[in-house]
Amino acid sequence: MGIVFLSRDVALDRLVAIKLLPPALAGRPGLRERFLREARTAAKLSQPNIVPIHSVEEAGDLVFFVMGFVEGETLGERLRTKGPLTPNEAARMLQEVSWALGYAHGRGVVHRDIKPDNIMLERGSGRAIVMDFGIAAAVSDVAGGEVLGTAQYISPEQANGDPVDGRSDLYSLGAVAFLALTGRLPFEAADAASLLAMHITRPAPPVLAVAPGLPRKLAQAVDRCLAKQPGDRFPDGEALAETVGMSVEQRRELPVAVRLWLTKGQESRMAYLIWYGGVGGGFGLLVGQLASLVLGPTGGLVVGINAYVLTPLLLHTGQRLWRLRRLLGAGYSVEDAKLAVRGHAERRREEVSYEYGSEPALWAKAIRVLMIASATTFVGSVGIGLFLVGGAQLALTALGSGATWFLTAVLQVMRPGRRITRDLSAELRSKFWDSRLARWFERVARIGLRRSATPAELTYRPTELAIGLAADALFESLPKDQRKELKDLPAIMTRLQHDAALMRKTVDDLGGALAGLGEQGDAARSSALAGGDGAAGAQLMDTRAKLRADLTAKRDQAANRLADAVAALENIRLSLLKLKAGTGTVDGLTDDLTAARALNRAMDEVAEARAEVEALLKAGRTSGAARLSGPQHA
């Protein structure tokens, strides 16, 4: 449709982009009018995520308009050069484009050609900007019969030549998001006609089936955009933007002290590999030989093996104790450490699933088999050499297999030969900090440590943790005899915090499930099934309505329990504050603890219902599959 020049506006001293209709085309009335229509349509829209139009000009055979210059690259260029976006990057792009479309739709303008090459990513800020309203039209003008758009991203109603509204753009945006998250399109075919037919007749594959490990609510939002019936999609861009804003958890930035405690020492994995792959064996052999001079061959063997196995573990434990001591000395707590570790494990699950969740290449599988074989050979040959008299051939076998094991293990760290959906070390670390051993670890780190003032950076803490830590500090400041009377208080506080965290996660999970079900599609679904098995359609609608009601009730129950747990924590904190100030009594605090125990018992019932909640979520996913296949079957 045009040629774009980078120019300078001399009067305002700014860079602008001038889009010019080539003179050979400007003489054709239909194309000239269409070009001017694009400019006039876009000029009506003034929104931060839509490229601004400064002026529309005609000068003889020249027809052009002046628009804002966006320094950056298109989303298409970004995907072609660097691959898929991260979930957070994709969520931001999806949200900002949704805002732009919601604004345009609110003014009666449908874009009709949303695709990666019509979305600019501004350099520096990363802001997504929608451009090229070349085939945009007012909703009142879109009467149907004309098929316009890009085949890879076109909506079913647009491909059919039916009348369209803003929800057609949301379908196209869903296809763009699918590509941005997975690196592939929801539908692929050799020609445009086949693509149009697939958009019209085939359900889009669930995005999680292509890219495991994505945030579930973000995946559900994309799947809902790609629903065949417009009524099953989001009603408008604002609704999509709001859902996407909640789909990827906005993790608060950890304070520097906590962040350093979390990340320092993570580089030790390669050191372990080097130690156990070769260096440690020589060290263990040397220590064993020296010990055998005093303890004999058997004692030397035991000491050598222990030196080989335990030396890096003891060094690592000492390092972690020292770093935990520094963290506690800065005024933070073990609960802060637990919070950081849990967040890290969740991020690693997403990252590892995204990077290694697909089937590995054949060469990676072969190297994994070689690594296992060489490790078995090395261990076997060393064992034979320890208990039997080994010759030069055995020594060479051990040396060769050990070197092969080390090299293949390094390659496996770089590219595993099997599907991986979680980081085992991060998971184990999270479990350790939830165990009783972590309490002992904390007590050792606190030996001789002075209590520090509460640090200023506490905004990353959830409400229940912030209140619980404040109450713990108040409890520790009470006289010894009062602490003895209230000996059950720390355990009750810990339980309340745990219950509140569980309820918070339950509310989040159920909210995401409800968003995935959608609340706009019953009428459209009824219409879609009207030509087929009406009884089956009615049964499907009844099932989905019951499921939505069940999920809503469970979500509201969990939200109420969360509020109760936080309120109980706050009551205990206030009672402790009064007790410390001399205006409260132990008996009054005991009443609060009794109420907290009753709440704990009620929470047990909700915790037992988690299995039922998981069943409901599974039923929701099954119902979604039935919804996709049902109309097609009918």
Image (spheres, helix red, strand yellow):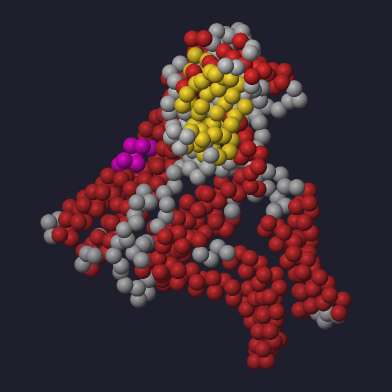
List x then y, in percent, for residue 1: 63, 21
Relative to 619, residue 526 above or below: above
**Residue drawn 36% across the image and 62% down it:** 332
Image position of 43 (left or right of 297): left
Q: Quadrant of the C terminus?
A: top right
Residue 97 showing in the rendered view: no
Relative to 589, residue 630 above or below: above
In front: 154, or 246? 154
List x then y, in percent, for residue 511: 44, 33
Relative to 298, residue 176 above or below: above
In front: 504, or 106? 106
List x then y, in percent, for residue 485: 23, 62
Image position of 586 (left or right of 183): left
**Residue drawn 34% across the image and 40% down it:** 561
**Residue drawn 59% across the image and 73% down it:** 312
Q: Inspect the magenta stretch and tell me whether residue 152 lies in it.
A: no
Please tell me in which quadrant of the rendered image residue 279 appears.
bottom right
